[in-house]
Amino acid sequence: MKRKEGFPGQLSYIIPESTREKLLQNPLFEGLYITDIGYYPHALYHYRERPEGSAQAILIYNIEGSGYIKIAGVVHALPADHFFIIPQHTAHSYYADKENPWSIYWIHIGGEKTKFISNAFSRSIPIERTNTSRINERLDLFGEIFKCLETGYGIETLEYVNLCLPRLLASFTHIKQYRSINEQLSNDPVSLSINFMLVNLKNKVTLKQLANEVHLSCSYFTRLFLSRTGFSPIDYFNQLKIQQSCRHLDNRELSISEVAREVGFEDQFYFSRMFKKVMNQSPREYRKGRILS
């Protein structure tokens, strides 16, 4: 026995193709947009097969029970608290476990950006339940989108739900960052070093000090930091200093030379050069622009 849909308590919303065509004329939807979204609870005998694949990427998030996804001839188990993103135009099938059927949230996602997301997440990826996992917040966001779509497919409604989509996707693709709001400082050396930087924004800090703080060699620490943030440790530290200096400049209580000293630059001219390198304008230009705006 196989069923595509029709499960007690299911929710599903399919944006009509004619409406989608109007959406694509709106620049807000060019890169990433929802075409279909839903929830199938305890989906006994659920089965879908698409030999030609789908025009959209498909995110499947299993919160209970078990199921399977077959892609490129490989069957991937999808137990509870796991998700999988099936790439566009890729032959696939998926189905619920007969003894312990899954309960899944799913989204069909269109747009040019989907290939950059799906290619990296076309495997079964766990979402561990912990006191920092924020799973309920993710499910609330699904629920919010469902509630909006219940009112119809008006342009403002579709604008809102599609502006919610990147945040919802980020809760899957960037789990560490999504959870970090609830996490205490861990033993992660990059996080520890950034915290050390924040505490020492008024000071001069060397690469050796940063590496020593997390008990790593300078070379290994630099490679690790660069791979995680895209910046060298000192460049990142200087960006944090400039970010803090912007706050002081916004307040307009300190002179530019005083702001420079507040973030550890004794030489105002060196501070101005560093500020312009990061912000593409001088501190004076930045402050003037903020006043005028």
Image: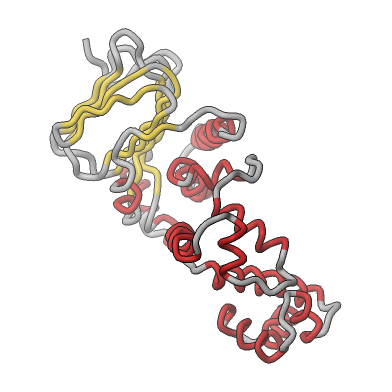
Q: Is residue 29 left or right of residue 120?
A: right
Residue at the right extreme, as displayed:
253
User: Which corner quadrant of the image does residue 220 belong to?
Assistant: bottom left
Residue at the bottom extreme, as displayed:
269
Q: Which one is nearer the viewer's eye here, 9 or 124? A: 124
Residue found 14% across the figure and 32% down from its top: 73
Seen in the picture, residue 27 relative to 174 is either above or below; the reply is below
Residue found 27% across the figure and 24% down from its top: 68
Q: Quadrant of the C terminus?
A: bottom right
Q: Determine if residue 12 is in view.
A: no
Q: Which one is nearer the viewer's eye here, 172 or 233? A: 233
User: Which corner quadrant of the image does residue 256 belong to?
Assistant: bottom right
Seen in the picture, residue 289 relative to 164 is either above or below; the reply is below
Q: Quadrant of the N terminus?
A: top left
Residue found 72% across the figure and 74% down from its top: 245
Q: Position of residue 49 (x, y in %)?
A: 19, 28
Q: Position of residue 128 (x, y in %)?
A: 49, 30
Seen in the picture, residue 26 relative to 67 is either above or below; the reply is below
